[in-house]
Amino acid sequence: MKIGFIGTGNMGAPMAANILASGHQLTVYDVSSGATEELVRAGAKRAENLTSLAIGSDLVILSLPGPSEVASVFAEVLPSMVSGQILIDMSTNSPELVKGIAEEAKRVGVGFLDAPVSGGVRGAKKGILTIMVGGDKALFDSVEELLSTMGENIFHAGDVGSGNVAKLINNSLAFSIMMANAEAIVLGSKAGVNPTVLWDIVRVSSGSSLTWQGGIKTILQDRLPTAFTVDLACKDIDLATELATDLNMDLEIVSVAQKMLKRFQASGLGQEDILATIKSLEDANQVVVRGVWDK
């Protein structure tokens, strides 16, 4: 199958690399030509523009920062696509936006799925992402093997938009838990408990979570990556609260996490990893937990 992949950034590049390694013909495009160099060296073709990529592909995948980028690229790509082609948006997006995209694609016979992912850069590199797919079940079945080159937990969530609903709920939970975890480790340290011991206690107790086990350990080891920025977290949690507003629902806990993230963003941490928000909590409480890992 001829695959066109648009957006080869932190997540897109390793996802595209796994598609290429599985034997598919791959054409890539990114606004930054340097982002495609490694893929081209591995055997991918770099498209000169979005039109040529769309024309030469059986299936086009988008992996972009957010709704505005997806809307812009879609508007440029769709006129060059024909009936029988497939478009999959693997960005984290607005459910309402992808529903509109699906309707426009349907009018010209182009199949559409929204398929956001979870698992971070590490999961993308290892090909073990969770992929949440919304759209026609028969279309999902026809591309599931392709999706399996990028992920190992692949779910058909329902109609178009359902994939992004699931992703926004997942991220809202993750961000809320991350903010609570950061406060907890700072509170424990300020109260005199060894942070490494506290991490171990919670790890095997009812307060444990994947974000506690991995994220807090990373903080204590002072190995903060730049894998998922505060700016991206703010974008995702905004989409989640917008979804809730559209459904006349208040998200009280998520709204607290949203306010915290916005405050961290305003303080200059926007381009740092979400785990780096611990710096503000340390400063506010005159406690240092980064780099105290002693296990």
Image (cartoon, rainbow, N blue to C red):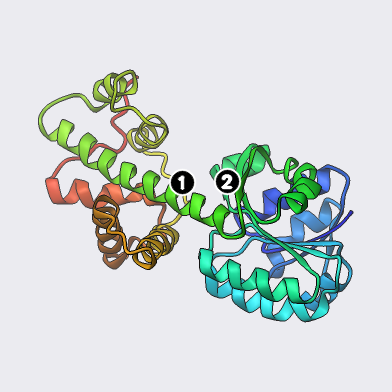
Give the percent coordinates (x, y) of residue 210.
Answer: 42, 32
Observer-nearest of 188 and 134: 134
Q: Secondary structure at mark 1?
A: loop
Q: CA distance from mark 1 to mark 2?
A: 10 Å
Give the percent coordinates (x, y) of residue 270.
Answer: 37, 63
Give the percent coordinates (x, y) of residue 135.
Answer: 66, 56
**Residue at figure coordinates x 78%, y 55% from the top left:** 39
In the figure, 170 relative to 187: above or below? below
Disc sitting over residue 225 in the figure = 1
Q: Are marks 1 and 2 in contact (CB under 8 Å)?
A: yes
- The crowding category of the residue bearing disc 2, from other C-alpha atoms within 10 Å (few below 14, some 14 to 19, many at least 20), is many
Q: Type of residue at label 1?
A: Pro
Q: Furthest residue to the left? A: 191
Residue of label 2:
121
In the figure, 168 relative to 109: above or below? above
Does residue 239 show up? yes
